[in-house]
């Protein structure tokens, strides 16, 4: 339910990786785009008789949820005996920290979310979610669903400069729920204590921190391999999200991107991301206040080369275990495709 030709950002990162891996497992047709383009593509696909012979349909839903054409298409597929697995990546509409009820549009979005989810559920054989907590929140505790957390690209090896002192944050630095403001305050506090540390923020236009910017804050526009070019000076990657009801349920895609970078991670103790860190031992988990973030940053910057290398190798091992190819195999299994 997104166009795949508008740059690399959260949802399209996931979809792009899954598209590539699913195509390696067998023949793959892709219908993508926003609602208008998608309606037309669905009509063309259906009237061309392309549904015949499909082994299954995997759906990546959007925050804006389905159009009537999406639901009709899936209902027709089910009537033809084609299994459908629908992935629900988020439930922003149910949480004030991401979706405040400050406009008619937002109030309508919240009111329509659960009915549309029920429609998707009725049109699907099974549904998939990134975390168990999100599945229980949306469907209820006893529902049948598939766990499909974000995957990781193949890990890369980029040597760390002996003088590396930068933390790396990738994402929307203006959204309070992502915590970049706390991170910047933590870096300033860490520097005030005498630690030589800087911060690089990779953000899309309009998502960079508001100025003026201190000398230690570097703003970059980068995607994919362009981010790899920044890594020699990066000592750790950071997810500074505050603990909120939704952030406890969510599992950021960028956590798994970070693992592939082969750098230690500094993350706040939101439930799901802290669980991954506990399982991987790929960095440091701290409380979500500024002082704790500063203490964590000081710990990482002051760590021995051996400890940094150990965290980095654990990150790469975790990235291999959470590969997108594994996620694609899970989708095939859920659809009953050999």
Image (tube, rainbow, N blue to C red):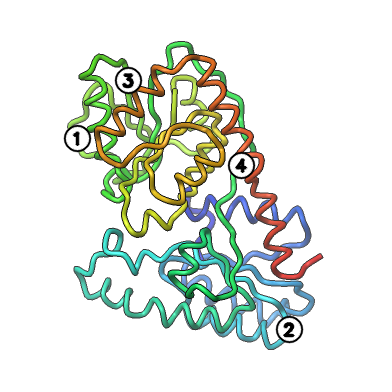
Q: Earlier in the sequence, mark 3 or mark 2?
A: 2
Q: Is residue 257 above or below residue 65?
A: above
- How many residues crowd mark 1 within 10 Å: few (<14), some (14–19), many (20+)? few
Return the residue at label 3: 197
Q: Earlier in the sequence, mark 1 or mark 3?
A: 3
Distance in Å between CA atoms under marks 1 and 4: 33 Å
Q: Earlier in the sequence, mark 2 or mark 1?
A: 2
Return the residue at label 1: 211
Return the residue at label 4: 153
Image depth: mark 2 or mark 1 in front: 2
- How many residues crowd mark 2 within 10 Å: few (<14), some (14–19), many (20+)? few
Q: Residue at x 82, y 65 (%)?
A: 338
Image depth: mark 1 or mark 4 in front: 4
Q: Residue at x 34, y 40 (%)?
A: 240
Query: Within the image, what quadrant is residue 83 found in?
Result: bottom right
Q: Secondary structure at mark 3?
A: loop
């Amino acid at each position: 339910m997104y166009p795949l030709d508008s740059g690399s950002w959260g949802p399209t990162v996931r979809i792009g990786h899954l598209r590539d891996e699913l195509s390696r497992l067998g023949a793959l047709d892709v219908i993508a785009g926003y609602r208008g383009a998608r309606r037309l593509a669905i009509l063309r696909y259906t009237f061309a008789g392309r549904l015949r012979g499909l082994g299954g349909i995997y759906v990546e839903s959007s925050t804006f949820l389905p159009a009537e054409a999406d639901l009709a298409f899936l209902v027709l597929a089910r009537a033809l005996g084609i299994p459908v697995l629908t992935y629900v990546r988020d439930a922003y509409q149910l949480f004030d920290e991401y979706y405040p009820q400050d406009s008619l549009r937002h109030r309508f979005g919240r009111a329509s979310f659960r009915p549309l989810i029920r429609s998707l559920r009725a049109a699907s054989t099974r549904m998939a979610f990134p975390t168990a907590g999100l599945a229980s929140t949306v469907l209820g505790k006893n529902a049948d669903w598939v766990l499909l957390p974000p995957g990781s690209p193949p890990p890369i090896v980029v040597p760390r400069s002996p003088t590396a002192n930068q933390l790396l944050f990738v994402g929307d630095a203006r959204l309070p729920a992502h915590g970049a403001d706390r991170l910047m305050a933590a870096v300033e506090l860490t520097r005030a204590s005498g630690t030589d540390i800087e911060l690089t923020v990779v953000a899309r236009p309009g998502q960079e921190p508001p100025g003026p910017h201190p000398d230690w804050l570097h703003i970059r526009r980068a995607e994919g391999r362009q981010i790899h070019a920044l890594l020699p000076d990066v000592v750790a990657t950071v997810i500074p999200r505050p603990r909120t009801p939704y952030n406890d349920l969510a599992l950021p895609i960028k956590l798994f991107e970070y693992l592939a970078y082969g750098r230690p991670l500094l993350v706040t103790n939101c439930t799901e991301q802290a669980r991954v860190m506990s399982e991987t031992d790929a960095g440091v988990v701290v409380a979500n206040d500024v002082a704790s973030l500063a203490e964590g940053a000081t710990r990482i910057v002051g760590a021995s080369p051996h400890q940094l290398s150990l965290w980095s190798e654990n990150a790469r091992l975790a990235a291999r275990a959470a590969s997108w190819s594994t996620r694609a195999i899970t989708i095939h299994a859920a659809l009953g495709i050999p």
